[in-house]
Image: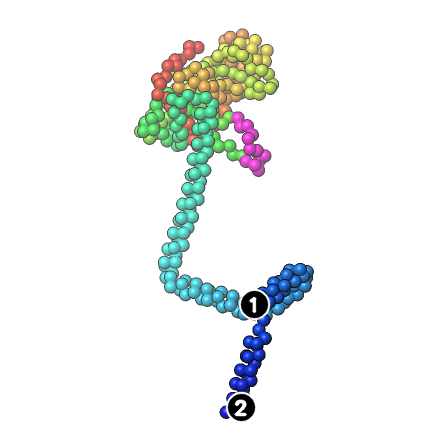
Amino acid sequence: MGTAGAGRGRLRTAMRFFEDHRLPKPVLFALLMTASLVAMMLPAETLARLRGLSQPLGLPQWLMQTGSLEVHRTAMELISRNIPADRYRQLELERDALLNETATLRHQNTQLQTTIAELANVRRMGLPAHESLIPARVLAMDAVSGRDSMLVGKGNLQNVGKNDWVVSNLTVGAGTHEGVETQAHVLGHQCLIGWVDQTALLTSRVVLLSDKLAGKSRPRRVLIGPADASSRPAQAQPDVFVLEPYGGGRMIIRDIPRRMVEAGQIQVGDLVTSAPDDTRLPIAVVIGPIDDLQPNRDKPICFDALVRHMIDPASLSEVIIVGSAQTDSSTPVPR
């Protein structure tokens, strides 16, 4: 009891000493501010040495990180064990189906964006607002030998009418790998290939300008101009010629004056375009280049020009049908 009492007495004496010698709060605040100012003035290298004092804290931190990772791994194992194998396989199949559907939708979106760009290009060529543009998928080429025609997947349900003109719709198969640059000019994107001859509810039959059997009743007024305007200037008032089907994917322009050929006004490679005098197609659209110039056997003062399609129609996967609310007032031009 005497020892315990002596200890308590010494503790009371010490507490009384500290209370008697306690620093006033203003003095303590001033000391702390002074220490802070001194620490701010010290070089960074001096304080960097104190960072080593925190190294012993790395061990408990590592233990806590390892423990949390182990708990997470154990929880994931327990969750996976609770899923039956057949259910897991079903989820895998659903995941694969969703991935395939996403890829298909992405491809369809790209195709739609391309079609929209093509329609905008045709509209910028000067097509009037009352002319409708109907994109149509090419279903098949004509299986009959000697006929140049195709079946497309749009018909009466989409307001496709007989004698509507048809232009090609292409996606250029070249990109930056082949040196194609942004804003580069592309020729031959939209070309006149034929017209709608028969329509059904969901499909239409397109006759090509080169169809020798059906095209006789529908000659086309055309213009001839240089493919490269820098090679020679185009005529201010170009002559109008008549384009007729020749068969085998080619057309023919007859009775070209020999003087024009000999003077170089018309050459192989010149582009043939439609004359903008048709109510259904009141703009000039490229048909194709002159493939050959041959003397006319019956008229020595004339030449005949063989014209091929700008694009092989058999390679097309989609076309654009130019519909119109107006009636077709164009009449066949006599030979």
Residue identified by numbered label 1:
25
- Secondary structure at badge 2 equals helix
Residue 38 falls in image quadrant: bottom right
Residue at 57% over, 76% down = 20
Residue 112 image offset from top left, x and y in percent: 43, 35
In-front residue for pair 66/205: 66
Dots 2, 1 in contact, CB < 8 A: no
Label 2: few (<14), some (14–19) or many (≥20) C-alpha neighbours in 10 Å: few
* Residue 148 falls in image quadrant: top left
Residue 251 appears in the rendering = no
Amino acid type at circle 1 is: Lys
In the picture shown, does residue 19 fall above or below 35?
below
Rendered position, 57 above or below 15: above
What coloring was used for the rendering? rainbow
Q: Is residue 131 magenta?
A: no
Q: Nearer the viewer, residue 16 or 242?
A: 16
Quadrant occupied by the C terminus:
top left
Q: Which residues are magenta?
A: 175-187
Quadrant of res 83: bottom left
* Residue 50 percent across, percent down from the top left: 64, 66
Q: Between 245 and 65, which is closer to the camera in this rendering? A: 65
Kindly identify which residue carries mark 2: 3
